[in-house]
Amino acid sequence: MERIPILKMGEYLLVTIQVDMHDRLAMTLQDDLTARIVEARAKGVLIDISALEIVDSFIGRMLADIAAMSRVLDAETVVVGMRPAVAITLVELGLSLTGVRTALNVERGMDLLRERIRERFSE
Amino acid sequence: MTVLLSDQRTVQRAEDVVAIRQAVRQRAVELGFNLVDQTKIVTAASELARNTVQHGGGGRVTIEAVEDFGRRGIRLTFEDEGPGIPNVELAMKDGFTTGGGLGLGLSGARRLSNDFSIESTVGKGTRVTITRWR
Amino acid sequence: MNEQSVLHDLVSRNEAEILQRWIERQLGASNFRSDRTSKAEVSDQSRRFLSLFRQSVSSGTADLHSPAWANTRQMLEELSVSRAQHGFGPSETALFVFSLKETLFEGLQDQLPKDPKAARQVILDTNQLLDRLGLFTTEVYQRGREQLIIRQQQELMELSTPVVTLWEGVLALPVIGTLDSARTQVVMENLLQRIVETGAAIAIIDITGVPTVDTLTAQHLLKTVAAARLMGADCIISGIRPQIAQTIVHLGVDLGTVMTKATLADAFTIALRRLGLGVTKVGAPKKRPEPEPQSTTRDRIED
């Protein structure tokens, strides 16, 4: 069965979504990711959606769910690379993706993750 | 209104939703929509296709290139013989606030298109038509 | 006898000669623009048109919208659009067809039917046909100019709202003039695209130069800010003048969590602070360099 690959980079997990996902694939990703966070004791998850031309309410909710689940598992999530057309459409759709942190690209995303994790440790 | 091109497809499985997105994208590109408008109509199509699969028990979509008073547009009609929606207005309002699949998809599709119409009879089925003009 | 067949006979039997005289007529015209076109170009265009014209005339129909005239129309369209783009005037472009009319009439004199009524009909029909072709050329020319104007307007829209990099990671969008729906969308999409390209963390939208804001514009602004946030960048709206502040409140527009500042300078200070940067004094202000002594210039002129 096709799966979206999850890369381990130190304490972080990197997911690059490059295909037009159908719902089943999205659910599989969610399951895989939660399992990997636990297994790898990851502190941060970076989801790169720069290849996605469409983000509809289902994908949007998936991202929000992943962020929420990771938080429960003590990991931070950042979504990066959202395209302008996608952002404009999501705003029009009325989907605000609350609870999902975003950054412009992988580099910024990593900075943000490190910052957030540092903050949490200092609590 | 004249129909320039018409194309019908099945909307039965999750994979069909992806195929529909691509078909709508292609038609929108051919009609000369700009990128943002393309994204909006494809996203609307995705919402409605998913509704058809998940709540309508599967159905079909007709993708049409239309022309009216000199302007061109794309019209999508999603039909199913599913359970139907008892209270459409309520569903669209509720779905929007609770984030439940059906309602959010409908209200979302409405926001992303210029014309929106829905007919639904309990026990018979549902038909949703959206149009986006250039 | 079909009036058009007289014309067709004339052209098909004497095509080379008509072409030659037509080209000469065009090149010899008092308003021939040798700076805008060449003899070779005129010859080529004329040769092609005459050939297509002959084929269309052979169909027997004078209806320019019929398929028989499609190729001829297309060639004229391409010619008109090209000439419009090269700065030719509309009359100059129509002259292409009208100079052919004159040449054809010269040749028709010997070919007319003996019967005066039939002869008159041939003249009238030929005249009408060529006139309509000439008018068609002008119409297409007009459309070509309109499209050019629309394209230029588009470019002007984008140019009049440049996105400026104030500092690494900070963009500014100084908006000048009224924002109508179409312009706002173009401008905002441009801003979001630049945010991606430059990787800016903060974008300052300065509306000092915007005289009025209506509900739709305010909504577009807010949607842009929301979209930028979704992408991972933040926006500050600056330059809100008192009148606009009043309008926003009266319209009931909810700015929500969007930060607003009175001036671009204030917004820039905030942006820098957010990035952990500040401006410090590093010493006394430097003196302006001394200007060149006058005598040197005078000497050079006297040479």
Image (cartoon, coloured by chain):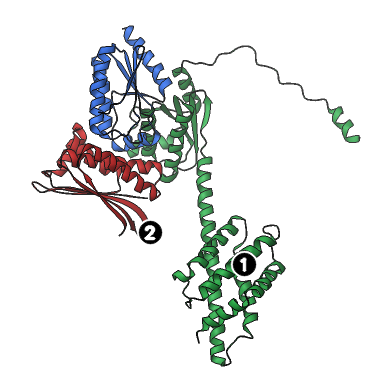
Chain colours: A blue, B red, C green
Q: Residues within 10 Å of mark 2 (few under 14, many from 20)?
A: few
Q: Is residue C238 visible?
A: no
Q: Position of residue B54 (x, y in %)?
A: 17, 38
Give the amino acid type for the residue marked by disc 2 in the picture. Gly
Relative to C116, is C65 above or below?
above
Residue at mark 2: chain: B
- The residue that disc 1 covers is C47
From the viewer's side, name the closer residue of B95 and C16: C16
On the same chain: label 2 and label 1?
A: no
Q: Position of residue B33 (x, y in %)?
A: 39, 47
Q: Quadrant of residue A48?
A: top left
- The residue shown at (45%, 21%) is C270
- The residue that disc 2 covers is B70
Q: Position of residue C303 (x, y in %)?
A: 91, 35
Circles 2 and 1: CB distance less than 8 Å?
A: no
From the viewer's side, name the closer residue of C279 and A34: A34
Q: Is C111 left, or right, of A61 in this rendering?
A: right
Q: Quadrant of residue A112?
A: top left
